[in-house]
Image (cartoon, grey):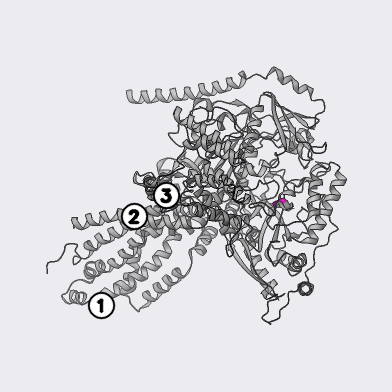
Amino acid sequence: MANYLLRRLLLIPLTLLAILLVNFTVINLAPGDPSTILTSALSADGSRAADQGTERSTDDQYLLFREHYGLTRPILFNLWPGRTKNQVKEDLEKLLARPKGMSARAHAEFRVRVGDRSRYTLPLLLELLKDPSERSELQKVALEMFKRGGTLVGTSGGNLTPEMRSKNQQIARSNQKLRQIKTAQEAQAWWEEHRQLAVFEFNRMERAALFLTGTRLTGYLQRVLTLDFGAMRNDSHRLVSKEVVKRMKVSLTLAFAPMLISFFLCQLIGFTMAVFHNRWPDYFLNLMMLFLYAVPVFVVAPFLIEKVALPHAWPTSGFHSSWEVYSGLTSWHRLLDIALHIFLPLTAVLYGTLAAQARLSRTAVLEVLRQPYVRTAYAKGLAPFKVLTKHVGRNAAITIVTSLASSLGVVLSGSLIVETIFGIDGFGRFFYEAIVNRDYNVIMFSALAGGFLALIGYLIADILYTLLDPRVTFVAQKK
Amino acid sequence: MLYWSSLLREEETKELKVEVLALKRQLSRLQLQPSPLYRSRELAVHNLLKTDPFYEETLPQLLGPEFEPHGVLRVAEIGKPENLHPFSPWHNVGELLSMCTLPVACTKFGFYEEISPGMALAIERRDDEFWVFLRDQVYWEPLKEQFFPAGFQLDESFLEPHQVTAEDFKFYFDAVMNPYVQLAGALGVRNVFADIEEFRIIDPLTFVVRWRKSEGKIKYTALQATSSLKPLASWVWQRFPDGSKIIEDDDYRNNSVWAQNFIDHWAKNVIVSCGPWTFGGWRDRQITLERNPHYQGPGGALFESYTVEFRAVPDLIWQDFKGEKIEFFDSRFAPDKLSELQEFIKTPLYQEQTPIHQLDSLDRAFRYIGWSCKSPFFKNKKVRQAMTMAIDRQRVIDSYLNGMGVITTGPLSPADVGYDKSIEPWSYDPVAARRLLEEEGWVDRDGDGIREKQGVPFSFTMIYFVGNAISKLLSDYLTTALREIGVECKSVGLDVADLSARIETKDFDAVILAWTIGSPPPNYKQIWHSSGAEQKGSSNLTAYVNPEVDELIELLEYEENLEQRKRYYHRFHQIMHEDQPYTFLFVPKRTLVYRENLGNLFIPSDRPDLIPAAVVTEPSTSIVYKIDG
């Protein structure tokens, strides 16, 4: 048993790594990045402000932001330092004239990618700039990309050492000069003066090292291995892990409480239906469960607000009262306040799970009731209560445990609808907003936390099997 | 006992420390003396700012002599802002920021182009320069440690008030113009200030803005733009939390490293305040503002505090309003709720509550379908006219907006003087639309119900914002309506990120969107000047080009004669109507639903008894107060 558990626990980090890799790739390959959210001035009603002038987009739009979040690097492998002069020229030609079949949007994305690569191809761009045989249009684009590649970001945040301050000053000056460059000679002069400011040229060894290390994935992995899951995109002082845990408390309340309640209630209802199989209690409960199962949560939740909360002046939103009120309450009153706030959301989460699990429990109990060992138990004169609790209950519970435990990871995101309708700032809504806002740190940590919970859920289920059914064992059987 | 007494002593010491700090802040407020050079204000003999009689006389009369600000004004908004950065793209953050600061000058209550003292007491024009004389003794409120996460180290200097000076206005200008500050709020106003040639500080309370001249004239909007300059707290945004400066050379207009730190600044979730309201804190989904007791300017807060709740869906706001948890419900959130209101009024719950009132007004926005002039389908204006004629706009308003809208004929607000009321909207006429398409060579030759031209079927893609219910309904309707004239419209709903990317690259045939219309004088260069037609990310989404429109826009930039300006606007409106780069669908009507215990909620133009000749047709909530009893 201990061996088995140890193996399972050791597998968790590996599984999480796989989850991380899949999620990281999918998220990074999804169209748009956090900077596209920044560009949007759409309001909730889909309107944009027409009262102000807007400066045209430039190649370095959101460059500082993208650099800061490592979005200018390739996702999994970095082959950019190895690009040849011809490849660079080919890229520039494509920028000059959009190839047939390439949409305007794909062309714009290609432009951003070429811009990101230019950091690694600066000497080649300079060569093209200086080459008198090259067309002036091509050199114009080469100059734009040269400026783009040469723009550096300084060290952000306080507590800077004198060296950091000095480097920041040099970077600011370099960027300012870079912006003013108009000719190849000026570009050459800038190159001579500032080439030492960052690594712009790479030898074979450095290229090989960059292949794996100069990517978004390694950047993220380096942080994750030191348990640094990053900060919120909108506030660098708020750690993602803390924010997720804060909301997890809310969501777990909305996930665990209905899970526990429904486990006991569904056993009770399932048993009643199975024992009174094909008689009126079975028909009645079956019909009721079917009805509950059929009514979607987005219908029930507003109904509860409209018909229960509003007429009785119950809270209609939030996990607790406003901070002004809540902070003035005693611990006991805080508990009551939370209970009053979550009663309706809990009901909304509970009824669906209960309906589904009760029907599952009925089937499981019926299945067990038909087993020969149950008939044997009755035959040997055991009291019906004892047969039902000791022989039927334990075995039927295995099905429910499997179903509930495996849903642990899903229930977190599943409470999104309830959290939205009841205005609760929980994990489901937090995760959803992070996806919409492309907050990579939150998405990744949430996916990992959800995956971890699901794995723990399966492990608990496996352990419960052995407790519920002695025939299940983790010790290898000798043949 | 010893333990308890030491605890009590500790509590007392803490309280004493808080009181001493408060006293110290009050003292520092008194110690700041006006600069001797400040007397230069008296030189402003030709002050362009006129006092606003509404704030001076009318409002005090409306409130009564006994009035004291009281109560909490509770409102709700959809969504949640990313942060409270001074250049945040989120329009509600802009509103909160404007409540907590004051620009150089304010528009007079009920008017658009008339200005009154704001942070400045006087503005004087001297040739191509505007001399701005600021108020004395206006302070930035200190930051509070509770605004920041636990353990965040904040230098003592941030916990003291600082005087608002000319330096803060120049700093705002530099921050806007810094090319590395690529935030929507800065990009939005950079063009407005692009013609400022020099920003000169004379003394701590006086600065000069010199505008570029063209043929001896400065831009018509130069005064308004100068008036819109705001202070940006240099004592916060130039520094790290430990009080040290982010950069040493003070070159905030060009420095990329400062811009980098400014974009991700440690105070970006705090509103540094010097206006009628001060920032009270941001917790989860609630932002609180408090009345600034030190504020002396126009339009002081009439409530003790103001809270904004951020809700995910309009339904939650509606429930909050019904439960008397917020004071207003704006029909912009969900027009369909107005029909529910009639039902709600009949319920027993409502009978126990404060009565509800409604206030209707015309929104300063319009919804449109933009036809890409680059698309092979919509290059020709006759085709665009045919599209407009195939759409029954009145039906759209009646069916999808419950009649809460007005058909519009151009990109102006029907309430503005520039709107040519003589222009009749294109009538709904599918027969005429079919005829126009046939004249342009779009004929259904193979009998499949879709027209073709040179073998290309008239089948195009229309994109819209999937999060907007009206756009979704419109796209469904348009697919059916255009099918009737032999045009296939494939509508694609996109989220914000995808839609923005497609709009930015002009990668669409048609788009359903809306523009909010700014305060007059309108700036049409942003959307209609041909200089933006080929630019990535420009607001000329449809790549519209018309040399006459360009000329009119350029003339309007410098024309000062109001009658001549009106003629230019009317001509512009006529061209827009004829060219139909957009199908101008409708201007929505807005209903503000509120409780009876709120006073002073009215539309300025409807109250000539209070504000003679007022032109603003929208209600303002800034003068609302709570009626006792």
Q: Which residues are magenta?
A: B531-537
Q: Nearer the viewer, residue A19 or A232?
A: A19
Discs 1/2, front: 2
- The residue beneath circle 3 is A215
In space, the residues marked 2 and 3 are separated at their CA atoms by: 20 Å
Q: Name which of mark 1 and mark 2 comes first in the sequence.
A: 2
Q: Quadrant of residue B87?
A: top right
Discs 2/3, front: 3
Q: Amino acid at mark 2?
A: Leu
Q: Going by the image, does B231 lie left or right of B226? A: left
- View extreme (right): residue: B563
- Residue at image position (25%, 57%) is A8
Of the numbered discs in the image, which one, if any, rests on residue A414? none
Q: Residues within 10 Å of mark 2 (few under 14, many from 20)?
A: some
Check if residue B469 falls in the magenta segment.
Answer: no
Q: Amino acid at mark 1?
A: Arg
- The residue beneath circle 1 is A370
Q: Chain of mark 2?
A: A
Q: Going by the image, does A334 lie left or right of B565? A: left
How many badges with numbers are in the image? 3
Asked which secondary structure carries label 2, the reply is helix
- The residue beneath circle 2 is A16
Q: Going by the image, does A332 lie left or right of B88? A: left
Asked which secondary structure carries label 3, the reply is loop
Q: Give residue A266's position: percent from left, percent from top.
A: 35, 66
Residue B117 visible here: yes
- Residue at image position (27%, 66%) is A398
In space, the residues marked 1 and 2 are separated at their CA atoms by: 41 Å
